[in-house]
């Protein structure tokens, strides 16, 4: 294993052809050998066609190493997909589909856009442990024509006009989880926090937005009063989650330029994955295993 982020030269050396990519994917999917993606049966036998097997218990079901992954039914070689993943993970603020299109030479921009979205869907963490320790929760707004000023999001409890709300929770020096939501009412915020934060948390920090008022019932809850110019009170602050929001906003404005509400959660998942694997020396391995 490489003890630092992989360089492009190392990536190309590691994956010189399609067979090397498929072997890598097989090893990450099935460390103990191929098994049926339908029933999990390990009694499969290899077919004459490379990287294809047949299950003995599924009526002769045949499958390839790509079945059940984001790479299934694709016209592009796995080698190209691996480069797309590499480029998407190499930049802290992400890489636009237009730039990837230029770098790997896809037939069209829409093809690169489709591939990037498939990768983002694969990076989505559907299974996560509830956050513990010192946790911060905050919401932000993305998009629209107005400026993202912190106090503006409080207007009428609905946020700035034309913007999409995102709620996030982060464990200090740990992981973050973020979701696009319809509104920032107390019920929505409370449901998110109870789903993502352990009730055994050491301290839950939020700002003074009224939507967080009921969290005292389930958590050791600390509040900083931003409206009064208060941002840090001992261990109580939301600086970490606000730093994550800054990454997302700089990425959207500087890299992607414009993101629709429909696909915003996919971009949030991409930023979440990179943040949660920021110290992972083999982030590419983790990404391909999840895809």
Image (cartoon, rainbow, N blue to C red):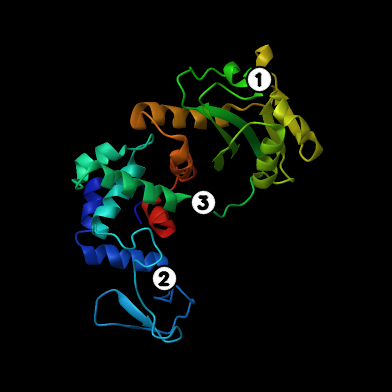
Q: What residue is shown with label 1?
A: 156
Q: Residue at x 34, y 66 (%)?
A: 66
Tell me residue 92's x, y (percent): 38, 36
Q: Which callout, 2 or 3, points to the residue nearer the camera?
A: 3
Q: Distance between the residues labelled 3 and 1?
A: 32 Å
Tell me residue 47's x, y (percent): 29, 82
Locate the C terminus and report the quarter of the image it occupies: bottom left
Camera sees residue 165: yes
Tell me residue 205's x, y (percent): 68, 31
Query: Could you say which disc has been placed on residue 30 in the image?
Result: 2
Q: Quadrant of residue 127?
A: bottom right
Helix, strand or loop at mark 1: helix
Q: Which callout, 1 or 2, points to the residue nearer the camera?
A: 1
Nearer-the-camera pick, 131 or 6: 131
Tell me residue 177's x, y (percent): 56, 42
Quick check: marks 1 and 2 in contact, CB under 8 Å?
A: no
Q: What residue is shown with label 3?
A: 125
Locate the N terminus and report the quarter of the image it occupies: bottom left
Q: In which quarter of the image is residue 242?
A: top right
Q: Residue at x 54, y 21 (%)?
A: 161
Residue 3 sits above or below residue 254 on the image? below
Of labels 1 and 2, earlier in sequence is 2
Query: Could you say which disc has been placed on residue 28 in the image?
Result: none
């Amino acid at each position: 294993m490489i003890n630092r982020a992989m360089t492009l030269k190392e990536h190309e050396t590691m994956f010189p052809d399609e067979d090397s990519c498929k072997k890598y994917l097989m090893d990450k999917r099935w460390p103990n050998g191929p098994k049926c993606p339908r029933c999990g049966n390990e009694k499969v036998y290899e077919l004459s066609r490379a990287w294809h097997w047949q299950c003995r218990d599924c009526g002769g079901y045949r499958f390839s190493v790509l079945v059940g992954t984001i790479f299934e039914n694709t016209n592009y070689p796995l080698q190209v997909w691996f480069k797309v993943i590499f480029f998407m993970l190499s930049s802290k603020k992400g890489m636009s589909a237009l730039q990837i299109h230029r770098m790997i030479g896809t037939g069209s921009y829409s093809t690169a856009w489709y591939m990037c979205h498939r990768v983002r869907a694969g990076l989505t963490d559907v299974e996560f442990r509830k956050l513990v320790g010192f946790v911060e929760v905050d919401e932000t707004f993305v998009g629209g024509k107005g400026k993202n000023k912190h106090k503006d999001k409080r207007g009428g409890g609905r946020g700035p006009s034309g913007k999409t709300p995102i709620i996030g929770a982060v464990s200090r020096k740990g992981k973050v989880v973020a979701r696009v939501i319809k509104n920032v009412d107390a019920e929505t915020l409370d449901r998110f926090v109870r789903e993502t934060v352990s009730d055994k948390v050491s301290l839950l920090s939020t700002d003074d937005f009224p939507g967080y008022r009921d969290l005292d019932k389930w958590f050791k809850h600390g509040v900083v009063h931003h409206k009064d110019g208060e941002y840090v009170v001992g261990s109580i602050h939301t600086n970490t989650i606000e730093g994550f929001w800054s990454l997302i906003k700089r990425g959207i404005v500087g890299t992607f330029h414009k993101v629709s509400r429909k696909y915003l959660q996919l971009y949030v998942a991409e930023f979440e994955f990179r943040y949660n694997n920021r110290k992972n020396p083999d982030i590419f391995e983790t990404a391909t295993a999840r895809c």
